[in-house]
Amino acid sequence: MGLQACLLGLFALILSGKCSYSPEPDQRRTLPPGWVSLGRADPEEELSLTFALRQQNLERLSELVQAVSDPNSPQYVGGLHRFPPTSSLRQRPEPQVTGTVGLHLGVTPSVIRKRYNLTSQDVGSGTSNNSQACAQFLEQYFHDSDLAQFMRLFGGNFAHQASVTRVVGQQGRGRAGIEASLDVQYLMSAGANISTWVYSSPGRHEGQEPFLQWLILLSNESALPHVHTVSYGDEEDSLSSAYIQRVNTELMKAAARGLTLLFASGDSGAGCWSVSGRHQFRPTFPASSPYVTTVGGTSFQEPFLITNEIVDYISGGGFSNVFPRPSYQEEAVAKFLSSSPHLPPSSYFNASGRAYPDVAALSDGYWVVSNRVPIPWVSGTSASTPVFGGLLSLINEHRILSGRPPLGFLNPRLYQQHGAGLFDVTHGCHASCLDEEVEGQGFCSGPGWDPVTGWGTPNFPALLKTLLNP
């Protein structure tokens, strides 16, 4: 009998009342740390079940990810798929002079494009196989009317699309969420004129985002957007070990397939929680997964001038307590740990863990349209993540139209190139525990990679040149 038939039979027995599960008395009393029993579920309550089978040969899968994502590997293809060009590549004008100063009254697409040196020609061709996507969770939904109004207000100086190409999942009714509005509007204005999908995942897992449900959906689809941005995350310690490892396996599969997954680093700095009476920093997941590219946040050094960037104090970053440091970042992280003049006490973080973020972008003071209302000063790495993702989609456009594969899992290449094509952010620290030992300060930025802004923020023409070959 097949698995599907077995499960259907089991459900039939349960529903008929002929089969039930009664744990032993000691099992009833044993709950994971932090869990509280709320009693039996209401008989009328609808439950959404996701069956995620235990995965095998994970070491071989990890080796495959490294082989297909490392430009120095003979197996490198940017992932397991190639996509042929469908038209010729246009000539890009000479880049602007970097560091140009200009006045602004909040971050808009024109501010992003000026700071990161995009010209009006840096948009999708509209004829390639290129695509990008963002995911929305926690009953957050966008409105098409908000996107159209946003583009009328802020998209007048570059070619763009005013509607989402495809929504996968249930797009809820009612009021739009600022988070979902922000994600769609800035992915589509940074990755301008590129086909954009939105994955909408209703329901929750343990009261939080159903990441596994979304990832299994991706695993079961053959044709997917090349870049996915996600502005959601949870503290590592708030998720069960089995769940976090199973989600990470799906992230590994996505990397092997050549998908570029970007996650926000979070908005709590290094975080803080108490363990056995002592404070420690609190890493977030999926930002801490070794198989995603994590995006931190910055602010302008002068609040109303388009100029150099410094750390946005809320920018999430640190070291995983679950995942060991991957080989691709060994050199960069070791250098930071040995040279940073402002390193927190070692008891606050796991120095051998996966370190994040990998890159950063502006995360402070955005304009967003939500429920037909323009809203100023929206901030968070929820903003920096779709911006960086959109710029990677523009680079994919060039790669696809010149016969190369999409970027795929970016991190091995990113760390090999030591921040080439990025503005290094060297000033500022992010927030952490408000105690006498660290006094609210977590890690600080410095030359090269750091666990606050990663390698830095994009200088588009230089980043394009760096990532266009091979």
Image (spheres, grey):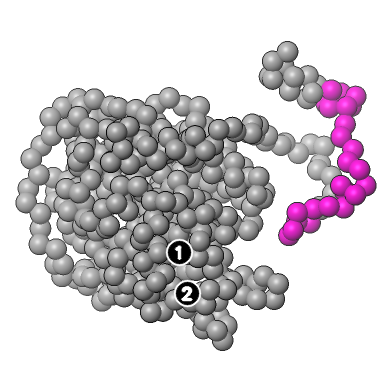
Q: Pointer 2: what residue?
A: 442
Report if the CB atoms under discs 1 and 2 are less than 8 Å apart: yes
Percent position of residue 419, x then y: 27, 58
Res 430 → quadrant: bottom left
In the displayed structure, would residue 443 be above or below residue 172? below
Left or right of 201: which side holds 6? right
Q: Nearer the viewer, residue 418 or 268?
A: 418
Amino acid type at image mark 1 = Gly
Residue at 50%, 27% (x, y): give it: 220
Q: Nearer the viewer, residue 243 or 64?
A: 64
Residue at 39%, 71% (x, y): give it: 338
Element type at mark 2: strand
Q: Pointer 1: what residue?
A: 317
Residue bounds of the magenta highlight? 13-36
In the displayed structure, would residue 341 be above or below residue 193? below
Left or right of 388: which side holds 320? right
Res 111 → quadrant: bottom left
Percent position of residue 263, x then y: 44, 51
